[in-house]
Image (spheres, rainbow, N blue to C red):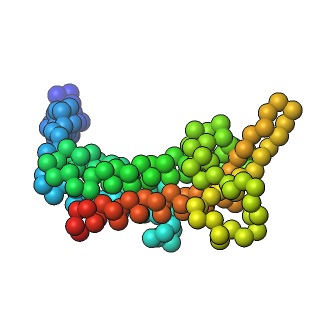
Amino acid sequence: MKIAVLRRYLAPLVTGWLLLAPGLARAAAPQETVAPTATSNVHALRQIRLVPTHLNTDRLVLADYQRALFRARQAVDIAARSPNTAGVEALQGALREYETALEFWELCIGNTNDWFCDEKLPVAAALMQRYPVPRNANLANVDRFAQPWIQTRVRATLREVVEYIPVSERGKVLKLLWESAQTATQQASRAIGE
């Protein structure tokens, strides 16, 4: 009687373990690396084009952006190992721009306080150097400057003077990064021929 009860209750558990065992063995096995092909750069270009931005979509979610960037990073890494390396440098440049935008988004966009996105953050400092404010110029006529720039502000305390990117300029920073990524993607498209 006890054996019948044990079989009745243990049979589903044992069957479940037997069904899971092949999956566990597959998960424990090392994953094979994807071999690059002659069209890896075309696939990488298509993955880069699928990265959503505010320039090509109305609503943008950080998780979707991260997933698309992860897939694009994998495709560009495979394309870099392929025998046909046409346009790979431009794809890597576009990927760097998208990754910089992601880092800026994660560190600065969510913060509503101006002072959290200051020159102490490496990504903010790099962007301030890349898009400097024109010095000794009338900022009322901004259309005459050939190079894009970010309006920054300075916070002064008794101990330090810190330059920061205000909340009002953070959307412009992402737009500038995404535009330069799209320019690099267009260069890659011309090099690949698609």
Q: Position of residue 161 (x, y in %)?
A: 78, 38
Q: Is residue 77 above or below residue 11?
A: below
Residue at the spot 59% in from the left edge and 53% down from the top edge: 131
Viewed as shown, does residue 161 lie left or right of 190? right
Residue at the spot 58% in from the left edge and 61% down from the top edge: 147
Residue placed furthest toward the right: 158
Q: Quadrant of the C terminus?
A: bottom left
Residue at the spot 84% in from the left edge and 36% down from the top edge: 157
Res 87 quadrant in image: bottom left
Residue placed furthest toward the front: 136
Viewed as shown, does residue 123 lie left or right of 115? left
Judge whether residue 12 can be spotted in this image. yes
Q: Is residue 159 above or below residue 55?
A: above
Residue at the spot 25% in from the left edge and 62% down from the top edge: 191
Count every numbered label the image shows and give the total: 0
Q: Position of residue 162 (x, y in %)?
A: 74, 40
Judge whether residue 14 can be spotted in this image. no
Pick whichever, 46 or 81, lies toward us: 81
Q: Position of residue 132 (x, y in %)?
A: 63, 52
Pick whichever, 110 or 29, lies toward us: 110
Q: Quadrant of the N terminus?
A: top left
Q: Is residue 92 above or below residue 176?
A: above
Viewed as shown, does residue 141 lie left or right of 94? right
Residue placed furthest toward the top: 2
